[in-house]
Image (tube, coloured by chain):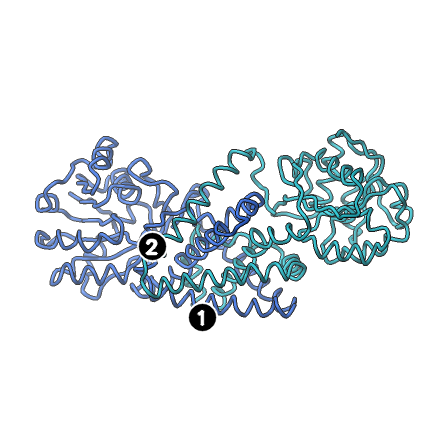
Chain colours: A blue, B cyan
Amino acid sequence: MRIVLNKIVIFGVGLIGGSFARALKKAGAVRTVVGMDRSAASLARALELGIIDIIGDDMADAIKGADLVLLAAPVAQAEAILSALAPHLQAGTVVTDAGSTKSDVVAAARRALGGKVAQFVPGHPIAGRETNGPEAAIDYLYVGKKFVLTPLAENSPDDIERVAAAWQACGAVIHRLTAQEHDKVFAAVSHLPHLLAYALVDDVANKPHADLLFQFAASGFRDFTRIAGSSPEMWRDISLANQPALLTELDAYLAQLTTLRGHLAAGDGAALESVYANAQRARHQWITTIETAEAPRNKDSAE
Amino acid sequence: MRIVLNKIVIFGVGLIGGSFARALKKAGAVRTVVGMDRSAASLARALELGIIDIIGDDMADAIKGADLVLLAAPVAQAEAILSALAPHLQAGTVVTDAGSTKSDVVAAARRALGGKVAQFVPGHPIAGRETNGPEAAIDYLYVGKKFVLTPLAENSPDDIERVAAAWQACGAVIHRLTAQEHDKVFAAVSHLPHLLAYALVDDVANKPHADLLFQFAASGFRDFTRIAGSSPEMWRDISLANQPALLTELDAYLAQLTTLRGHLAAGDGAALESVYANAQRARHQWITTIETAEAPRNKDSAE
C-alpha cells in the first residue's frame, strides 16, 4: 500500500526516529514531521538538519490531528510518554514504537492508555548503527531490513496496515510475531550474546594480568566483543525489560557450557568436535542464507 | 639483525608456512625453501606458485644443512614430525614451530628430540586469514603482527635470535612469553571466545524453533559468532592441547555468568549496568590502543 501521512510525531529524534523521518520524507510519504525529545539541543539539531519540520512543545498541540506517533526514545521512557500522551490522544491517531523488547512495552501501554490501547500498534525495526543522535540519522537505515510487527488483539486491521505501510515506505520488510515470540527470539539471538560479550570483557578486565591479556587479544576477540561496545544503560534496560526470556536463554546456555566443560575435562575430543562442527555447519548455512538475501550496501547494520 | 638463511625446511605449505616462505623470499632473507607436507597436491601447488623451491621426499636429505626448520602443520602432528626428524637433526639447524598452543608442543619436543631439544625454539605468529592452503599464502600476512617467542631454558641466545630475525624479516613484531604465560593468555583472549561462540551457535541450532531464531539473527550475532566459522578439527586440537588453562578460564567465566544471572534474577539494574559499563570502558580503551598501533591494511588478520 502506498501511504501519504499528513502529520507524524516522533518522540526521540536520534538515530532510529530521525532515520524514520528522513526515510518517509525521501519516499514522499509524509507532509509534516513534529519532533519531541528530552534534549532541546537534539531537537534544534534535528530541525536544522531538516529531519523534523516543527519542534513540539505542548503535548496536546503536538499530537493533535497526527496520523502516526512513533516512540523512538529509550524503552524505559515509554510508559511516561504514553501516560502524558493518553489524555490528548484522538481517534484516528495510531501510536507505534521502536523498542527492542515488546512484552514490557505492551504492558506499559495497557497501563498508560487504558481504553485507548487499541490505537497502540507495537513494533521493532531490526536495524541500527554504531553511532547515535540526529547526526547519525540516514534515510536508508531501514532499506532491506526487517521490521517486526507485534500487534495486539485489540488493534484494527487498518491501524496495523498504517504502521506496516509507513515502515515499508522506509524500505523495511514486514514480519509479524506475537510480543512473547519476539522477546523469546531476541533474547536468544541478540540479548544473550550482548550479556555474554559484556561478561567476557569484564572478566578479562578484572584479572590482575588484564594488560597482558589485552595486549595479545586479536581480531577474533574484537569481533566477539564488538557488541560490548554498546550503551550499558540501554542494555541494562533491555536486560531488565526482557528478564524472563533472557533468564531462560541464559540458563540453557549455562547448561550447554557445563556440558562442554565436561567434555573438555574428560578430554573427549570427539564430543567437543561434534559440538564445534554442528555450530560451524549451522552458522555456514545461516550466513549463506543471509548473504543471498541482504544487499551489500547494508553493511553497517546492527540490532 | 639482517638475516640471510641459506636453506629452510617448511612442514606444512599452507597459509602459515607458505606465507612465511613468501615473506622471507620477498625480503631476500632465504636462498632455498624445501617443502614437506602430508598432501602431495599441496606440495605440487606450492612449487608451482613459487612458494617452495624443492619438494622434500627424504627426511635426512631434506633437513641436511638447513639453517631453519618451521613446523607449520596442525599441532597434533608436531610430535610425529619431530620424532621423524630427530635422528637426522644436525648441529647448526634450528627448529621452530607456529602452533597456537605452546606447553604441549614443548612437552612433545622434549619427548621427541631428547638431548637435541635445545635446538627447538618454540613460537606462535598471531596472524591468520579465513582461507587456507598454499593459494591463501601471502607475503604480507605477518607485517605488523605479533610473533610470540616462548624460548626454552636450554635454547642458546644465537638460536633464539635466528628465529626472531627470520620472523622480523617477515615484518612481525617480536614478543617473549614463557610457554605457560602464552597458554594462559591465549586461553583467555582466543580459546575461550572460540568455545563460547561454538557453544552459542550449537545451542541455538539445537532448539526446536532454530529456523525462527536464525531468521531474526542480525549483525551482532554474526560478529559474535564469526569465530565459530573456524575449523572444528583445529579447535578441538587446540582445546585439548590447552586443556588446563582453558578449563581455568572457562570456570572463571562460568562463575562470572552465574554472578550476572543473580543480578538479572534479582532485577538489580545497577549491578548489571556496572558490569556492562566496565566492559564497555575496557573495550573502548583497548580498541583505541590497537587502532593506534595497527596499520589499516592488516584488515583480514585473525588468530
Is B23 situated above or below A272?
A: above
Question: In this rendering, which labeled residue sits more in front, label 2 or label 1?
Answer: 2
Question: Which residue is more in the foreground, A118 or B36?
Answer: B36
Residue at 24% across, 52% down: A97
Badge 2 density bin: few <14, some 14–19, many ≥20, Cα 10 Å: many
State how far apart marks 2 and 1 are (Cα). Answer: 28 Å
Report the front residue among B108 and B294.
B108
User: Is there one chain holding both mark 2 and mark 1?
Assistant: no
Residue at 33 percent across and 54 percent down: it is A236
Residue type at tag 2: Arg
Give the amino acid at mark 1: Pro
Count the labels in the image.
2
Q: Chain of mark 2?
A: A
Q: Which residue is mark 2?
A: A236
Q: Nearer the viewer, residue A273 or A149?
A: A273
Residue B27 rendering spot, x and y as whole percentages: 74, 30
User: Which of the image's four quarters has the N terminus of chain B?
Assistant: top right
Q: Is residue B139 above or below residue B206?
A: above
Q: Position of residue A149 (x, y in %)?
A: 29, 58
Q: Quadrant of residue A102?
A: bottom left
- Left or right? Give the position of B256 relative to B46: left
Q: Residue at x 57, y 34 (%)?
A: B297
Residue B39 percent across, percent down from the top left: 78, 53
SS at mark 1? loop
Please indicate, yes or no, whether residue B190 appears anywhere in the rendered image.
Answer: yes
Identify the residue position indicated by label 1 in the image. Answer: B208
Where residue B237 sits in the image (x, y, percent)?
A: 67, 59
Which chain letter goes with mark 1?
B
